[in-house]
Image (tube, rainbow, N blue to C red):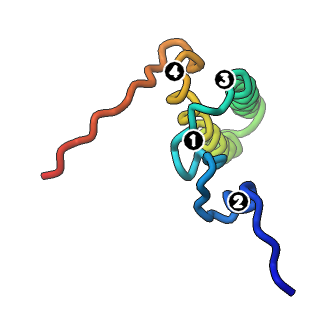
Amino acid sequence: MASQPRSTIEKCVIGEKTSERSINPAKDRKVDKEIDKDVTSEVCEQLLDAYLSVEKATKIIQEKCSRKEFECFRSEAGRVAGGLYLLLEPLWRAYPDLAPAGLEMTRRKKKARR
């Protein structure tokens, strides 16, 4: 039985390169400017809400649990927050005006190799 061609989503999930825009910003670290700004804005809002929920949960654990429980939770919460940033950062680079106030999303200059 011949296999059917994979969709763009399937290709991105399994890591194949596609000629279409990336939907895996954590891997490619770029967002195509063709992505609708309204959609990007909505996604950023949802991901920021998730980040704030993680931050709030961490504060609750700190206030109501042992130091050991807090340190364990904080460690894992940091991984989640970092993952959310990996999703948000390329979106903010594509649309710097969507980044939170005070977060500068300008292009970094490449360091010269020695």
Label 4 or label 1, whichever comes before in sequence order = 1
Depth order, front residue of 34/56: 34
Amino acid type for the residue under numbered disc 3: Lys
Depth order, front residue of 22/76: 22
Amino acid type for the residue under numbered disc 2: Val
Q: CA distance from mark 2 to mark 4?
A: 27 Å
Split into 4 quadrants, where in the image is the N terminus? Answer: bottom right
Location of residue 50 (image quadrant): top right
Mark closer to the observer (2, 3): 3
Instruction: Please provide percent x and percent y for residue 67.
Output: 65, 39
Q: Which residue is mark 3?
A: 37
Q: Which mark is residue 96?
A: 4
Disc 2: CA contacts within 10 A as few (<14), some (14-19) or many (>=20): few
Disc 1: CA contacts within 10 A as few (<14), some (14-19) or many (>=20): some
Q: CA distance from mark 2 to mark 3?
A: 23 Å
Q: Which mark is residue 101?
A: none
Q: Which residue is mark 1?
A: 86
Q: Which mark is residue 13?
A: 2
Specify the farthest residue to the left.
114
Which secondary structure, mark 3? helix
Amino acid type for the residue under numbered disc 1: Leu
Is residue 8 shown left or right of residue 17?
A: right
Depth order, front residue of 66/79: 79
Label 1 or label 2, whichever comes before in sequence order = 2
Q: Is residue 13 above or below residue 55?
A: below
Is residue 70 shown left or right of residue 98?
A: right
Disc 4: CA contacts within 10 A as few (<14), some (14-19) or many (>=20): some
For residue 23, say whether it is visible. yes
Q: CA distance from mark 1 to mark 2?
A: 16 Å
Cβ atoms at labels 4 and 1 below 8 Å apart: no
Location of residue 40 (image quadrant): top right
Instruction: Please provide percent x and percent y for residue 77.
Output: 66, 41
